[in-house]
Amino acid sequence: MSSSRVRPLSPGDPQRLGRYTLVGRLGEGGMGTVYLADTPDGEPVAIKVIRPDLAHDDQFRRRFRSEVNRARQVPPFCTAEVLDADTDSETPYLVVEYVDGPSLTAVVKGKGPLSPSNLHGLAIGVATALTAIHGAGVVHRDLKPANVLLAAGSPKVIDFGIAHSSQATTGHTETGQMVGTVSYMAPERFESPTAGSVTPAADIFSWGAVIAYAGLGRNPFGSGDALTVAGRILTQPPDLDGLPGALRTLVGRALSKDPNDRPTARDLLDHLLTAGTTARSPDAAAALERQPALRHAAQGAAQEAAEEAAQATALDDPETVPAAVPAVVPAAVPAVVPAVVPPPVPAGSRWGRFALVVVALAALVTSLTVAGLVYKGLPGRDSAEPPSGAGSTSPSAPAASMPAGPVVVADALDAEGAWQERNDTDNRTTCRFDGALVVTRQSVGSYRCPGVQQVLTDFSVAVDVRLRTPGSCAGIWFRFENSAGYALRVCETGYALTTHGDGGQATVTPLRTFSFPSPVEPGAPTRVGIAARGTNLQFFRDGRLVGDWTEDRFQRGRVVLGIFELGQVSGPPPYSVSFADVEIRNLAG
């Protein structure tokens, strides 16, 4: 193990934290101190310990807990993996993988700019890390050479998402102070310095500045005091003379003044990995050939990003999901027949979108007419007789309470944390924070807000739900993985358990309805609970069991929150629901 980055412990430093033995200091920052520690098995780890004054700030602690939960979802593709955390102890701390290697800053200062092959390897590695980080809904906010470690096998990006977002969102910065290092900050950061204004595009700008520094041995906006450098970033083009031609164009795009002109992290990675692009060069091929770990990480991150994008396009875009078709189908549409997926149409085509609905509707009505089936409706819309199956509803449900287990996600949902905002103008839906996670949709259909990526088998989830406008229904997707899983619709008069994506990405098949003895009052909170253990699914309202269902179709997946307007709606748009105080517990074992 390299000892160049490790300093001895100070007299006031702790000797142990939980099961970890502290052996030295790795660094200090605005949020606290980073220590080198050993696990009981003798494996080295890095532990970030929160400053005492922040540890006693309830708002900071709550945000820190949410951000740790989100950071734990970042895949370890060229990142320092989050291994453990204790967010509830008197001294909160975060445990991450210890990366034994010098920083990019140290290497460039000691040996000068990287060779073309090493530079391309670095560009691929940092783009891979950003693809993983952004895919988990995290923004780094302080990407710089000091936060890139050149470990054996592949570069590793450290210190993402938590320290900086926590400081900025809890008021622990002084007037005029910005979170980040000026030489690597995007121009919009100087105009809107608050943490909430930072987007993934700011990290892309930092990527360009980091790669330019590594290839040139200097910052592309020159040196000097912070004000001078910031002025150049805002008004002058970067100086990229001397950067290898294969990378210069891509770095130039990343350093665009307008964040909308910058590529995404996935775009960067695609350009760097795909043969035939201007960014790909023999040096990039040599870097991937020489570093198999880098090649596997980059390919894994690219594949995961592509799968996530495909899932989002198929299931979060009601224009391409015929789940909304039953809204215009007459009473001959059965609840138990899946929606028909029409052939693909050109994206963005007005006629294509119209044709998609027409084709789906025609196919749906034809198949149902032949079958001679009758639509029974969905709870909160029409009266409904549940299909036969292994389930029970509230009149006969046995007494039960929500099961207990260790908390894996706890979020008040009053600001970005485990869940994130989204303004989807194409689908006329927003996910925003206004004292709660508010989901508003201007048309019939379903929409899921970006949130936790943690995959669980046995778990419980409880969340406060409000139906903010008449006719609105909330949606809680669970055991949802690879575009398929269960969904619980929460409407005024009851729950509806469905599958979503089983048999096709657009397929929605109701399984069971659970009627409420008293309806949910518009705008009033109700605590919705789901417990999934093995093949048994239980559904609670305000702590009381309202019904259960038994089957083994889906065994694991994510928990997703959103809005679920489907069937013959009882009110005009907009439809709006909100979520607050979500808590997910692990029931496995």
Image (cartoon, helix red, strand yellow):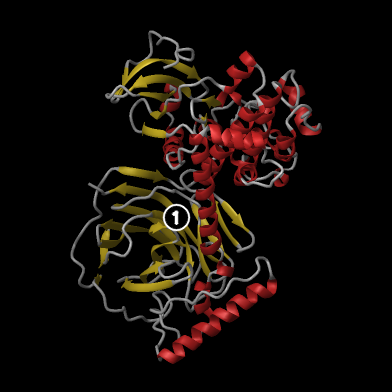
Q: Is residue 524 visible?
A: no
* Depth order, front residue of 220/512: 220
- Residue 583 sits above or below residue 32 on the image: below
How crowded pointer 1 is (Cα within 10 Å; few <14, some 14-19, many 20+) is rated as many
Which residue matches tag 1? 579
- Residue 223 screen position, x and y as percent: 74, 19
Residue 548 lies in what quarter of the image? bottom left
- Residue 513 screen position, x and y as percent: 33, 73
* Depth order, front residue of 9/152: 152
**Quarter the N terminus occupies:** top left
- Residue 375 screen position, x and y as percent: 41, 84
Please state which amino acid type lies under the numbered disc 1: Phe
- As drawn, the residue found furthest toward the right would be 236
Q: Is residue 129 visible?
A: yes
Q: Residue at x 23, y 72 (%)?
A: 390
Q: Secondary structure at mark 1?
A: strand
- As drawn, the residue found furthest toward the left would be 398
- Residue 497 screen position, x and y as percent: 35, 68
Q: Residue at x 44, y 30 (%)?
A: 57
